[in-house]
Image (cartoon, grey):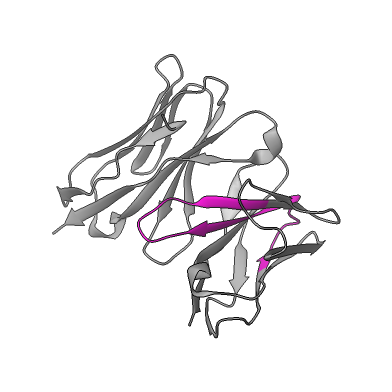
Amino acid sequence: QKEVEQDPGPLSVPEGAIVSLNCTYSNSAFQYFMWYRQYSRKGPELLMYTYSSGNKEDGRFTAQVDKSSKYISLFIRDSQPSDSATYLCAMRFTGGGNKLTFGTGTQLKVEL
Amino acid sequence: GAVVSQHPSRVICKSGTSVKIECRSLDFQATTMFWYRQFPKQSLMLMATSNEGSKATYEQGVEKDKFLINHASLTLSTLTVTSAHPEDSSFYICSATLGAETQYFGPGTRLLVL
């Protein structure tokens, strides 16, 4: 079993839809949780960064962390074609040299 | 803020040659830099962690003599792929951290070894 599981997709939604992306993990020691967006042939771009459980909102993006279930989510409201990318969840322990453990990434396509 | 650059963005080389990739943190001093490689439709695979002024820490299975990392300053780390072969063709991405914050990634370097 991988430490972080993420459905690779592809996920295809119509423009304007609400998108839900998820990751589950097995190690309860993870404390920091991130979502990155990666366009084709580009480096990952940090979207959301949260600590421990709870919600965080930034514009059309909402990140949720449920540590009791070892489950994190990223919601994208009013999705746009420009949101088409691969979304990677990542997490790390406190300390640990800032080393990240990544999910495999979910490929999202928002269609007109 | 937190901008990381990489150079070159793309390189094609002949088998047996060495290639150097630079990673720079442009607007902050990075305490740690990381090097990853990524194959098509796969996630990032951490190769090594590098701290300024000390030897890099390589992940299991990564040949330290093949992938030389130099971290000469708080804003620059280099990865040299020595005696490159076609199987080394990949997308190489660096990242940098600012203090205890998360990693900020560079745009990546696409290496093709013929």
The answer to whether B72 appears left or right of B68 in the picture is right
- Asked whether, in this view, residue A107 is left or right of residue A54, the answer is left
Q: Is residue A6 above or below residue B12?
A: above
Residue nearest the observer in this picture, A12 or A112 = A12
Specify whether residue A10 is painted magenta: no
Residue B37 is a magenta residue: yes
Give the residue at the far bottom of this rendering. B14
- Residue at x 48%, y 61% (from the top left corner): A43
What is the residue that sits farthest to the top in this orientation? A68
Residue B56 placement (x, y as % from top left): 76, 53
| The image quarter in which residue B64 lies | bottom right
Pick whichever, B60 or A89, lies toward us. B60
- Residue B75's place in the image compared with A53, above or below, is below
Q: Along the horizontal axis of the image, is B4 left or right of A48?
A: right
Which residue is outermost to the right? B53
Tell me where residue A89 appears, x and y as whole percent: 43, 40
Q: Residue at point 16% right, 48% down?
A: A13
Residue at (23% x, 59% y) in the render: A81
Q: Is residue A26 left or right of residue B92?
A: left
Residue A2 spot, x, y in % from top left? 43, 33
Location of residue B13 by image quarter: bottom right
Magenta region: which residues? Answer: B23-48
